[in-house]
Image: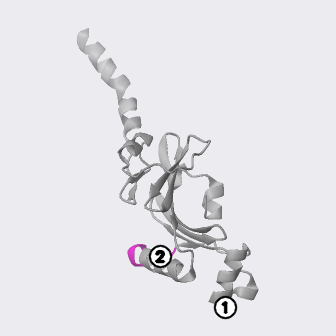
Amino acid sequence: MRARTIIGLLVALVPIAVGAAQPCLKMVFNQFCLGGSQQTLSSVTMPKASVKSSNPDQIGYDDGGKFVGVVIKKGRVAIVGRTEAPATRLHYLELKAKLTDIYGPPDKDFSYIPASGADDPEYQAVLIHLGKAKLVKAWVEDAWSIRLVWDQRGMVLIYVADNLSSSKEENSGGL
């Protein structure tokens, strides 16, 4: 009788243990476990940013002058993004080259550039700063993806746990 009780308890605990095992899809910026449990954020050594969000599922950190934003969905780290400065064409091309060296050429391009600026990189930068264009490249891995975004608001590098992100974020390329 006692053995049945123990076995019944173990069987009852199996779904809890399986549900608790939330894999780290990618360590982002050496601090954030993309796809991992929200509890993994307790080990982050970066100070929290002074800007507070009214949404408890959005947390900001200060990474030496760069803002790091984390979005929690279903108790897991779904999105990690970091501002990149300066927001210039040269810096964009440097980051894109680094990502391409690691992950290969971008898998998707969500960029929008009016035909009038398609061939002139300097004019593209002007259009971006005016909010009339944006550059968004995406590298897609098995369960996560990276987006490099340069738009009027600045430049950001975004890591997304694809199974936790919404279709709107997936299709727009940004947060």
Q: Amino acid at mark 1?
A: Asp
Q: How is the image coloured?
A: one colour
Q: Amino acid at mark 2?
A: Leu
Which of the 4 image quadrants contains residue 101? bottom left
Residue at image point 38% right, 44% down: 40
Q: Within 10 Å of the Cα at label 2, are there few (<14), some (14-19), or many (20+) other Cα atoms?
A: some
Q: Identify which residue is drawn at 42% across, 73% down.
A: 103
* Residue 158 image position (x, y, % from top left): 52, 62
**Residue bearing mark 1:** 119
Query: Magenta segment range?
Result: 101-106
State whether residue 4 is above or below residue 135: above
Q: Work out whether mark 1 precedes mark 2 in sequence or the reverse, and give the earlier one.
A: 2
Q: Residue 130: which numbered mark, if any?
A: none
The magenta stretch spans residue 114: no
The circle on residue 95 is 2
User: Relative to the observer, which residue lies in front, 95 or 50?
Assistant: 50
Q: Secondary structure at mark 1?
A: loop
Q: Residue 129, can we see it?
A: yes
Residue 109: which quarter of the image? Answer: bottom right
